[in-house]
Image (cartoon, rainbow, N blue to C red):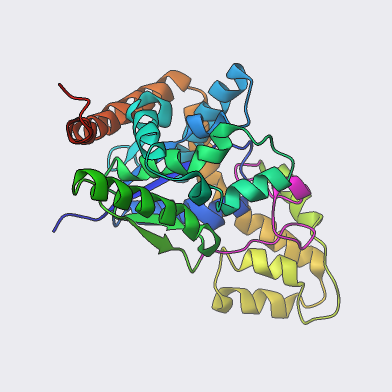
């Protein structure tokens, strides 16, 4: 049986932290071993907020380097840059001619971003249709999302259903793959780890950077063990492995933090080394990116040939 196809995309938003890894990228790596995965760095989506071309180029290359560093294999998965496949924006326009404005106005992500002060530009408003094109171009079966992102996949299904009703069966209606096991990683202050809170532990940080972040973790003496330290530690080791450490060092928060630093370093060092290798050879990264783009373009072009015939623009 053919493997089910998975699609997901990532925007670069600066330096990654361990919350990004355990919240999404770890699942990407695991899914890539079981499914036929198509992963994109969605640089056209980034245009809704980024106005600096140099920054966009750098961010895109950084994001792609990050995917390689965490262990996503470009030989067994398709990794590509969205803008290398023009079919994404072409199909988005076609969907925009089918989906109504009132339906787009229901988008939670749009409302949230505008409420946070982002410019209410047309790209941000139409964002769900470009996302639908991203997903539907590749006959995607599953889209990995958190429970709060379910609506993204609903928009893709709506676009597929509208097109199929108007022009005949063409697109699969994908299903959301809810990542129930996604960890909510606490930051150094106990809130959810986020760059906007300044409470992160860098994913590819040096041992000194890891130690500095871990030693700043807020602790309290109300429980048997420091909750925030233990919550992060439990991402790396199970209860059986951690119990003796926390019993032996009960009340000695410095020792427990030092143990966490050592385990983080052991976990992160291989990814950091891979990233450093790729960062030293950006031309190799670009070559891999171009190869992935060619694979994605071949699939998307076949789909768009059918789409153009169905809608009547192919002569």
In the rendered image, the vertical position of residue 188 relative to residue 171, given as above or below: below
Query: Residue shown at 72%/47% (left/top)?
Result: 115
Q: Position of residue 126 (x, y in %)?
A: 51, 38
**Between 77 and 149, which is closer to the camera in this rendering?**
149
**Between 164 and 128, which is closer to the camera in this rendering?**
164
Q: Position of residue 226 (x, y in %)?
A: 77, 72
Q: Quadrant of the C terminus?
A: top left
Q: Position of residue 1 (x, y in %)?
A: 13, 59
**Between 16 and 92, which is closer to the camera in this rendering?**
92
Q: Position of residue 153 (x, y in %)?
A: 42, 54
Q: Is residue 200 magenta?
A: yes
Query: Residue shown at 39%/35% (left/top)?
Result: 92
Q: Is residue 232 magenta?
A: no
In the rendered image, the vertical position of residue 253 relative to residue 120, given as above or below: below
**Part of the protein shown in magenta:** 182-205
Q: Quadrant of residue 39?
A: top left
Main SS, magenta region, reads loop
């Amino acid at each position: 049986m053919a493997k089910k196809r998975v699609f997901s995309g990532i925007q670069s938003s600066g330096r990654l932290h361990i919350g990004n890894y355990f919240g999404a990228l770890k699942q990407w790596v695991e899914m890539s071993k079981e499914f036929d995965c198509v992963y994109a760095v969605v640089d056209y989506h980034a245009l809704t907020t980024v106005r600096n071309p140099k920054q966009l180029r750098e961010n895109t290359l950084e994001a792609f380097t990050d995917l390689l560093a965490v262990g996503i294999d470009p030989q067994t998965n398709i990794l590509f840059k969205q803008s290398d496949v023009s079919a994404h924006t072409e199909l988005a326009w076609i969907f925009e001619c089918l989906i109504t404005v009132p339906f787009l106005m229901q988008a939670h992500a749009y409302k949230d971003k505008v409420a946070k002060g982002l410019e209410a530009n047309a790209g941000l408003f139409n964002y769900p249709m470009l996302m639908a094109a991203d997903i539907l171009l590749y006959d995607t079966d599953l889209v990995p999302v958190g429970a709060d992102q379910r609506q993204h996949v609903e928009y893709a299904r709506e676009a597929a259903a509208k097109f199929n009703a108007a022009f005949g069966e063409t697109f699969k209606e994908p299903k959301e793959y809810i990542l129930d096991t996604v960890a909510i990683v606490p930051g150094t202050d106990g809130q959810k780890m986020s760059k906007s809170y300044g409470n992160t532990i860098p994913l590819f940080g040096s041992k000194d950077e890891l130690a500095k972040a871990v030693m700043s973790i807020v602790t309290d003496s109300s429980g048997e063990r420091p909750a925030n330290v233990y919550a992060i530690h439990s991402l790396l080791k199970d209860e059986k492995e951690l119990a003796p450490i926390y019993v032996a060092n009960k009340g000695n928060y410095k020792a427990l933090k030092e143990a966490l630093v050592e385990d983080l370093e052991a976990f992160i060092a291989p990814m950091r080394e891979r990233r450093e290798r790729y960062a030293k050879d950006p031309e190799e990264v670009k070559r891999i990116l171009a190869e992935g783009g060619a694979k994605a373009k071949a699939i998307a072009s076949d789909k768009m040939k059918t789409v153009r015939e169905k809608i009547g623009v192919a002569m």
